[in-house]
Image (spheres, helix red, strand yellow):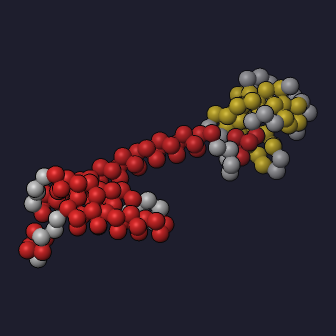
Amino acid sequence: MVELLEQVNHWHWLAFGLALLALELIGTAGYFLWIGISAMLVGVLLGALPIGWQMQWLSFASFSLITTWLWWRRQLSNDKHSDAGRELNQREKQLVGQTVFLTEAVNKGSCRIRVGDSSWSAKSSQDIPSGTEIKIVALDGIVLIIEPL
């Protein structure tokens, strides 16, 4: 087995990387992309420097972990940024700007209001009598901030 590993040259690594990239084209959602690029990096490294098979596999493992981790960090920051501006399936964000008539009087501070067919936690900076039209002006987590019109 060791003799087989010692015979691996840079062409084998480049072919292995291309095979992994071809598998990525089938639709594995990025699983083989960074591993394939790592194999190709080992092929380029082996073409430039004569390294043993142990170092080849350590380099492959290191490149795979580093490239995958870097991509994960970049994707995580993009996901957080896009989730902040997204309103789909986040009903509380869709409520900002809507007006509602109060069915019950609201005291200053925390309260519950009825919006549509749901009851929501809300905060008000003043007492608001029943029947007043209010506007949802902001969010504090999932708590609606309300003001009278």
Residue 58 point in image, percent of width and height: 18, 57
- Which residue: 78% across, 33% down? 97
| Side of 103 relative to 125 (left or right) | right
| Side of 102 relative to 124 (left or right) | right
Residue 42 location, quadrant: bottom left
Residue 83 point in image, percent of width and height: 58, 44
Question: Does residue 104 appear anywhere in the picture?
Answer: no
Q: Residue furthest bottom?
A: 1
Indicate the quadrant containing the C terminus: top left, top right, bottom left or bottom right. top right
Residue 107 location, quadrant: top right
Residue 2 location, quadrant: bottom left
Return the residue nearer the eye: 49 or 38. Answer: 49
Residue 35 point in image, percent of width and height: 33, 60
Q: Residue furthest right?
A: 131
- Which residue: 57% across, 42% down? 82
Tag count in the figure?
Answer: 0
Question: Does residue 109 appear anywhere in the picture?
Answer: yes
Indicate the quadrant containing the N terminus: top left, top right, bottom left or bottom right. bottom left
